[in-house]
Amino acid sequence: MSKALRGKSALITGGSGGIGSACAKALLADGASVTLMGRRLEALEATRESLQADLQPGASIELACGDAMNKPDVQRALQITQSMTNSLDICIATVGAGTIKPLLLHDEDSFMAEISYNIRGTFLVLRHATPLMAANGGGSVVCISSDAAKLVFPWLPAYTTAKSGLEGLVRACAEELSRFRIRVNAVRPGLTRTEATAALFDNAETYRRFAEEKPLGRLGEPEDIAAGVRYLAGPESSWVTGQSFAIEGGNELRKAPDMSAMVEQIYGAETFAKVLAGEDPLAD
């Protein structure tokens, strides 16, 4: 069978994570060579071993141990990716995370740190992949956003702000980089099973609370997200740019789940009562 990504190279930041490794599996199955970037070499090596069965003839899997928030590390990962096929064709930026934390429990440092964590790594990929992709006649960058960019999620103000900003970056760069035939898109996952979210999936009440707001009645698996990423990465989406596709079971047709009980459990009843009363829990 013809492999649509044969001869293409792809960098995946957060490559040993649940979504990152699922994206790698989808790209490898269609013939791409993939560089997995992450901070933990042992985790990257284990992920590479688990993906060997998906590796197609003539393709390869390389590792770039480094921090997606660090410019030299990102540049090195991009160079490794380009060296596999003498081109840089696809970048998947998956690094990001959110904190359940009310506005009144943030200070300026914690709030801005969460915004930076969700945008900085994607900016670095876009900024330093652009000259390499432009020299090769184009490419595709796919970013991982969140349904928090669209839905109102009480108690996640920093994360909601960060992902909304990320989608602004996607649209702005899609327009600016179109002259180089570089496409920039995103997927907008709902709550998806990963190492970081495993505890939420294992809690029956939390699972129910999230799933009841999804018309399709279940939470996400990494493969759900990877399917959308694979579409946006490949030639099938050659006329698509500046978009963010919701992959979240239909949650945006309804509303975000009520996470008040989780906030109270994390921070304590007394602190949460101050938040609800509009008092400053951080005041001396």
Image (tube, rainbow, N blue to C red):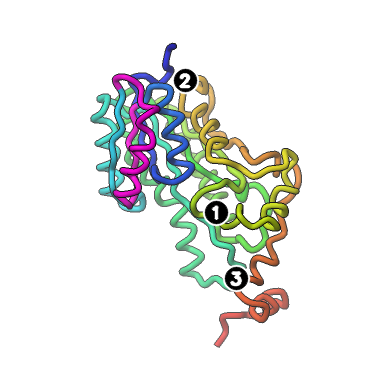
Q: Determine whether the residue tagged by mark 2 lies in a helix, strand or loop.
A: helix
Contact, CB < 8 Å: mark 2 with mark 3? no
At x 25% / y 36%, what residue is drawn? Answer: 80
Residue at 43 percent of width and 25 percent of height:
29
Q: Which residue is mark 2?
A: 235
Task: Tell me the quadrant of the picture where the C terminus can be found.
Answer: bottom right
Compared to 217, does 237 lie above or below? above
Q: Residue 110's x, y, as percent?
A: 48, 68
**Mark 2 or 3 closer to N-term?**
2
Q: Quadrant of residue 180?
A: top left
Q: Taking 229 as reference, is 259 above or below it?
A: below
Direction bottom: furthest residue? 284
Residue type indicated by callout 3: Ile
Say above or below: 222 vs 264: above
- Per the image, the residue denoted by label 1 is 197
Residue 91 in picture, x, y percent from top left: 39, 35
Could you give the CA–CA distance between mark 2 and mark 1, rounded to whole angstroms?
32 Å
Q: Could you tell me the amino acid type at mark 2?
A: Pro
| Kind of residue at badge 1 | Thr
- Residue 121 at x, y percent in the picture: 40, 49
Q: Tell me if mark 3 has few (under 14), some (14-19) or many (20+) residues whose alpha carbon lies within 10 angstroms of its own.
A: few
CB contact under 8 Å: marks 2 and 1: no
- Report the span colored magenta: 33-58
The residue that label 3 is drawn on is 266
- The residue positioned 64% from the left and 63% from the top of the image is 155
Q: Secondary structure at mark 1?
A: loop
Foreground of the two, 230 or 181: 230
Front position in the image: 249 or 116: 249
Query: Is 43 contained in the magenta span?
Result: yes
Is tag 2's residue or tag 1's residue first in the polypeptide sequence?
1
Task: Judge by depth and name the residue closer to the eye, 87 or 182.
Answer: 87
Q: Could you give the CA–CA distance between mark 2 and mark 3, rounded to whole angstroms?
A: 45 Å
